[in-house]
Structures are given as C-alpha cells and as structure tokens.
C-alpha cells in the first residue's frame, strides 16, 4: 500500500468516533437476493448514521452508485462502501455448478469462467465475490458439496488458484477485477453426517493435509479476503478460533487481508455456547481477528458494551478498521469510489459469454458408460421421446446459488432438442413430478417410450435440493422418479429384446441379483 493511502487511513482512524469505527466493520444486506435468515435492514439509515461499511446482495450500476453517492457525499467522513455478492458459478451468464465444472479437470476452463463472471459482476457495480468455495467435501449427503470441487485436495487447490486468477487482476483497482473471498475456512465440508452447521471432528493431520491447502493456495495467489466457517472444530467455533485465524493464517501464513464473517455467524457464538451474550460474542470474534460482521449487528450492538467491560481494547478495534480501510484502498475506492471505468457489456460480448457457458457445459459432462456405442448419435432419429420432470423445466437448469441468472433466459432440454433436431418428431411426457408420490403420469410416459426410436430420460433434483441447508439423508432420485425410470427402461429393454439385442443393464430399482 502506498504511503499516501497509509497516511490517509491513519488520518481517518484518528478522526473517527467509536460508532464510526464500528460502522466500518458492519456489513448489511439489500433485498436482491436471500442468502440468510431475517429481513434486510434499513441500510440507508445505517449508512447515513455512519454505521455501515459494506453491503451484500445489491448490484446494478445505478443502484450501487446511488448508495455509494450517499456514502461519499452525505456521511461525515465520506468513506466509500464496497459491494459483495455470491458469484459462485457465474453472474448473469450461468455456468455449470462448481462440482460439475471440477469434473472437467481443466484449469484453463476454471479461470475463463471466473473471468467472464468477474467482467459481468464488475459491470453491475460489484467489487467482491464470496467465492471460491474451497471446502474439500467427501459426503454426498452434504448439500453444499454442489458448490465445491469435491473430494480431492489437489484438485481443489488447483481450482483455488485458477478462480483467484480469473476473478482478479494483479491490480485490484482494474475496472474488471473482482476481489475473491475464499470460504469456508476450514473443514466445513467435513461436518458430521453431512449436516449443515453440525460439528467437525477430524485429526490435526487431516486438517492440515486435506482441508487447509486450498486456502493457503488461494492466499498465495493473491486472495485478499477469507470467510471462516459457521461450524466449530473440536468444540471451538471458527468465527472465534484465534489459533487458526490469528496464529496460523495471519501469523505463519502472513495473510494481511480481511476476514468476513458468514451470515449472522458472530451472533451465533451465543447458541454455540462459547459466549454468554452478544457483547461477549463480539469480543471473542474481534479478538480472534474477525474484521467484518455480516448481518448479525453483533459489532454494532455488542462492541460498545465490550469496550466498556474491558473485554476488548481500542487497539483491537483500530486494527480491524485499519484492515478494512486498507482493503478499500486496495480496491482503489478512495480514488475512484464509483468505478467509473467499469465494463459496459455489448450484445456481442454477452453472446460470447453464452457460448463460453455452452463450452463449459460440454466439458463438464461426464459419460459413465456408452454400451453398444449409442453415443454420439450420428443421425437424428425420426421419433424421440423426452421424458421426466426436468425435461421441460428451464428454471431448474440454473442450479443452486445461481447469482443474477434469470430463469426466463435459460434453455430447457426439450426446447434445445427441438431446435437441434427440427426434422424429428419430438414428444414430451413429464411422467412424475420432481418430488411427489403421484404415479398417474407414468403410463403415458411408458407408452410414449414404446413408440419412439430414441428415449431421453431427464431425472434428478430440483435446484433448491442442493446448496446451503439442502442436505439429504438419501441423495438418490427424489419422489417416484426411480419408478418412472424403471418403467421406461423396462420398455426400452423389451423392445431391444424384440430386435434380438442382448441387454445387460438392470432397471434403476432392480435388486442386484436380477
């Protein structure tokens, strides 16, 4: 950081009231997305009172510049805000979920998709993304495994480096650079029984060899922000874990960026059982090195009392404020608070981004088997049956945590096939709903399959069945989709037998000895 910015920051800290200092550590949400419990606060009132330092879930150049103008022109010290958002697998252009994209084993692809997402989000006034998600995850029951790269530490580490490079430029002041937040430090993916927010019990060796390397790689690649996990590690909540946040990451690794709490995480130190009240929770988090309080208002309500109690010192508060202001200086906000040179996307660029999404989807697909060389289909079949609850359901194609993607802009499988094979007779039957006990639609799907030359069966989860709070004890096909698959496969196998083709595949619900 330049001497000019260092001097500016010290002057600001010297001029601030305690309330204004705490305000710089307070992050509130707007209402353009729901990413946690509770209603959005009156962020404009908090801003005008000097009680707001950053925001999430607000995007769009007009909106962000309107709010920034109040921060710069209508507050006593004129300190700009920064705006963050969960740009997990694309912003306006939606790419495959991270778990799918990881299956491509393509570092260049990971970097390219992050670059597109950065350009689009920077064009809408965003300066920080709450990504990449670097939780090594080995339990498919955990809903948030969809946001991760899966089970492999090496793969997650390479993805961490690629995503940081893609989202950020070496200079964070670049107009198309979006700062990254590596999350969730650390071992959140090892929650007991795959249940969100459950405790984590792992060995010290596993913690250091399996779960920490991706975060170290992200920091080494230039990631300036980290988000600790909701969870506790061997009884100590990560939000208050000074041994990890201060001693290891800041001390041994040399991390000089900011910590941003997860949504309401500081207040949740009370139900964790490590803090008696909100002032105690605020003191624990601040002493552990937590800089920004996302949507708990624990610092706003608790730190004044904690200071009076002597649970924290003014030096602790000043250190956190100094890191937040230094981060804003790294973003160039003191010199260019409105990001005047942010990208302006053309129709041609948007079309290019959409083609990038198609390419990412192609590369991310995994073919488990290809008996009898069915694929690729060389010639369009005359009669095609497209079956299942996800065949004509474009919005579900967004996947979880889909940023600012719009369902009405998605292309469902049925529409895509009709555009690809206009000469074919393509018929559709839903068969069953995604998660329902109703079997009444299966006979129609069965009959359609019987009459067709090619059957495409589209089954799986709804987008909200994955992601945060989307854990499932039995991560198989929901509802009666397995019954639909059994019926359709029985039809296909019967027809193959009529044609004299030996069929070795078993129906979805068949017993192993069949």
Image (cartoon, grey):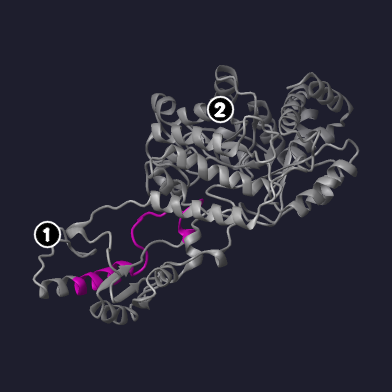
Work out whether mark 1 precedes mark 2 in sequence or the reverse, and give the earlier one: 2
Q: Residue at x 46, y 27 (%)?
A: 213
Q: Residue at x 46, y 52 (%)?
A: 96
Residue 466, magenta (yes or no):
yes
Task: Please state the horizontal and vertical placement of residue 33, each as a whole percent of the image.
Answer: 64, 56
Q: Residues within 10 Å of mark 1 (few under 14, many from 20)?
A: few
Disc number lying in front (1 or 2): 2
Q: Which is more toward the observer, 162 or 307? A: 162
One can see residue 311 in this view: no
Residue 513: mark in rendering: 1
Indicate the quadrant containing the C terminus: top left, top right, bottom left or bottom right.
bottom left
> What is the secondary structure assignment of the residue under circle 2?
helix
Say if 290 sits above or below 447 in the image.
above
Q: Are marks 1 and 2 in contact (CB under 8 Å)?
A: no
Q: Which is more toward the observer, 423 or 155? A: 423
Residue 219: mark in rendering: 2
Residue bounds of the magenta highlight = 463-492
């Amino acid at each position: 950081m330049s001497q000019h910015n260092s001097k500016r920051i010290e002057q600001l800290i010297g001029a601030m009231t305690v309330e204004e200092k705490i305000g710089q550590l307070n992050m509130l949400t707007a209402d353009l997305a729901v990413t946690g419990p509770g209603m959005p606060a009156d962020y404009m009132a908090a801003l005008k009172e000097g009680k707001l330092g950053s925001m999430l879930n607000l995007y769009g150049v007009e909106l962000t510049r309107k709010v920034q103008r109040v921060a710069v022109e209508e507050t006593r010290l004129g300190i700009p805000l920064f705006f963050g958002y969960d740009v997990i697998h694309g912003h306006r252009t939606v790419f495959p979920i991270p778990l799918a994209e990881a299956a491509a084993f393509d570092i260049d692809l990971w970097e390219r998709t992050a670059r597109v997402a950065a350009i689009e989000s920077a064009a809408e006034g965003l300066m920080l993304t709450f990504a990449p998600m670097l939780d090594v995850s080995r339990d498919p029951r955990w809903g948030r495994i969809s946001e991760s790269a899966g089970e492999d530490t090496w793969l997650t580490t390479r993805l961490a480096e690629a995503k940081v490079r893609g989202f950020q430029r070496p200079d964070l002041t670049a107009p198309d650079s979006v700062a990254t937040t590596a999350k969730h430090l650390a071992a959140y993916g090892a929650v007991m029984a795959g249940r969100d927010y459950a405790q984590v019990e792992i060995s010290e060796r596993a913690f250091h060899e399996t779960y920490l390397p991706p975060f170290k790689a992200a920091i080494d690649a230039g990631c300036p922000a980290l988000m600790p996990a909701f969870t506790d590690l061997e009884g100590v909540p990560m939000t208050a874990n000074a041994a990890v946040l201060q001693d290891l990451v800041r001390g041994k690794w040399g991390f000089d960026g900011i910590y941003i709490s997860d949504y309401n995480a500081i207040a949740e130190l009370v139900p964790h059982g490590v803090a008696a009240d909100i002032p105690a929770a605020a003191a624990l988090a601040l002493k552990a090195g937590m800089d920004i309080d996302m949507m708990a208002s624990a610092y706003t309500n608790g730190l004044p009392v904690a200071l009076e109690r002597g649970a924290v010192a003014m030096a602790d508060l000043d250190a956190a404020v100094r890191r937040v202001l230094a981060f804003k200086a790294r973003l160039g906000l003191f010199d260019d608070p409105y990001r005047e040179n942010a990208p302006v996307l053309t129709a041609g660029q948007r079309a290019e981004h959409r083609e990038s999404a198609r390419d990412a989807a192609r590369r991310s697909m995994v073919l488990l088997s290809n008996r009898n060389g069915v694929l690729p289909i060389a010639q369009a079949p005359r009669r095609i049956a497209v079956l299942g609850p996800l065949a004509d359901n474009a919005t579900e194609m967004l996947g979880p945590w889909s940023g600012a993607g719009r369902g009405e802009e998605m292309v469902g499988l049925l529409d895509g096939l009709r555009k690809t094979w206009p000469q074919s007779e393509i018929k559709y039957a839903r068969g069953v709903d995604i998660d329902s006990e109703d079997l009444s639609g299966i006979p129609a799907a069965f009959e359609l399959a019987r009459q067709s030359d090619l059957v495409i069966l589209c089954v799986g989860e709804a987008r909200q069945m994955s992601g945060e709070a989307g854990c499932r004890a039995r991560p198989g096909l929901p509802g009666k989709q397995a019954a639909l698959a059994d019926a359709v496969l029985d039809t296909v196998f019967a027809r193959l037998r009529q044609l004299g083709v030996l069929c070795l595949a078993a129906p979805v619900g068949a017993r192993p000895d069949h």
